[in-house]
Amino acid sequence: MANMAQAIRMALHYAEENLGVTDIFGEDVGAPLGGVFTCTQGLKTAWNSPLDERGIIGAAMGISLGGGRPVAEIQFCDYVYNTIDLLKLAGNTCWASNGDWNLPMVVRTPVGSGIRGSIYHSHSFDATMTHIPGWKVVMPSTPLDAYGLLISACKEQNPVMFLEPKALLRVKGDERIPGEPDDDRALSKMIDAPLGDRTQWKPQWPAELEAFAIPIGKGKMVREGTQLTVVSYGRTLPLCARAAATLADEGISVEVIDLRSLWPYDWEMIKTSVQKTGRVLFVNEDTEVTNFGEHLLRRTVEELFYSLLAPPRLVAGKFVPGIGLADTLEMASVPQQNDITDALRSLAGEQP
C-alpha cells in the first residue's frame, strides 16, 4: 500500500497529465530534492521557488489569474502565517468580482506535530485557515483520502488549502490507490527517487492511475457506534479510531467520523450521528482557544440541544506559543491516544 507522501505524488502526477495543472512549485519542490517530504519527486511541472512564502502565494495567484492552474507548496505551515493578507485576497477574488475572476489554485502545506519539529515546525493551521472565507479546506488522514481529495482540489475553480498531517506522511494505508501496483516494493522502485545522484533518474508512473475523486465536503464514517460520537481529522483521527477499538473491549460503543473537509464540512453526517448517540467529542490538535472544534461544538449545542444526553466536549492542543523539542513536551502539548480514550470513557459515563 502507498504511504501518504506517495499518494500525494501520484495525485499530482495524474493532475499534471490529465487535469491541466501547469505549475507545481515551492521551496525545494523541484529537482533534485522533490520536497522535504518527497511529495513532488519526479513531477514534470515541478520547479524550485526562492525562499519566500509571500512570493509563492503571490505567484500562485498570478498564475491562476493568467489562466494557469498551479499547485503551490509552503514547506511548513509555520511559515504561511506571513501570507495571511494574500490568502484573504485569493479567497475574496471570485466574490468581489461577482464571479468574473476565478483562482483555480491549490496550496499544500504540512501541518501539526509528530516529527519532533519543535516550535518552528509543529504548528497547526486548520483553525486559522477556516477563518478565511472563499477557500475550501481539506485535511486527509489516509493515503487514499489524500489522493482523492487532491484530485478534487485540482479540479476546483477557486482556491483550496490542502493541509497534510506530517506525522502521517510516511504511514501506509489500508486501501490501495486505484491503479497502484500490488507490490509495495515495486511502487517504491517506480516512483521513489534513489539516494545520492539523481541526475539521470526518472520515475516510472503506474500506467493505470485513475481519477478517483473524493467530493470536498463529504465526511467518512470510520466506525459505527451507538453510545457516543467522536469527530476528528488529520493526525488525531487514527488515535480516535484506536481509542474507540480499546473502549469496545469495555463495552462502550463509539462512532468515529473523519471530517476530511473543514470547509465545507459534512454537518449532516455529524447531525445524524449525534441524534443517534446523544454524546459527542470533537478532537484535533490545534490550540484549544478559538479552535475549529469549538465552532462545531457551538453549532451542536444550538441545533441539537434537545438530542444531547451530555454536554459536548473538545480535546485539543494546549494554548501555548509553541511545542518543545523534547518528546515529552511535544506529547504533553497535543492530544495523545490516552487523552482521547479518557475523555470518551468519561463522556460515555455522564448521565443526563
Image (cartoon, rainbow, N blue to C red):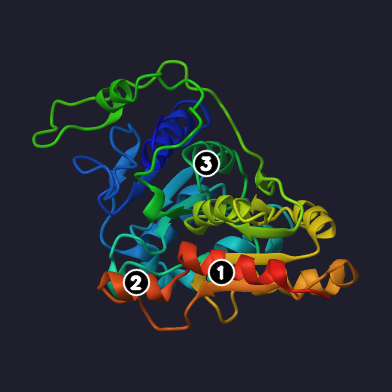
Residue designated by label 3: 150
Helix, strand or loop for disc 2: helix
Asked if one can make out residue 72 in the rendered structure from this viewpoint, the answer is: yes
Foreground residue among 260 and 12: 260
Label located before the other in sequence (1 or 2):
2
The tally of labels here is 3
Q: Is residue 62 left or right of residue 135?
A: left
Q: CA distance from mark 3 to mark 1?
A: 34 Å
Residue designated by label 2: 330
Q: Residue at x 70, y 58 (%)?
A: 229
Q: Is residue 119 above or below residue 210?
A: below
Foreground residue among 100 and 241: 241
Residue designated by label 1: 342
Quadrant assignment for the C terminus: bottom right
Residue placed farthest to the top in the image?
Answer: 207
Residue 186 marker = none
Q: CA distance from mark 2 to mark 3?
A: 29 Å
Helix, strand or loop for disc 1: helix
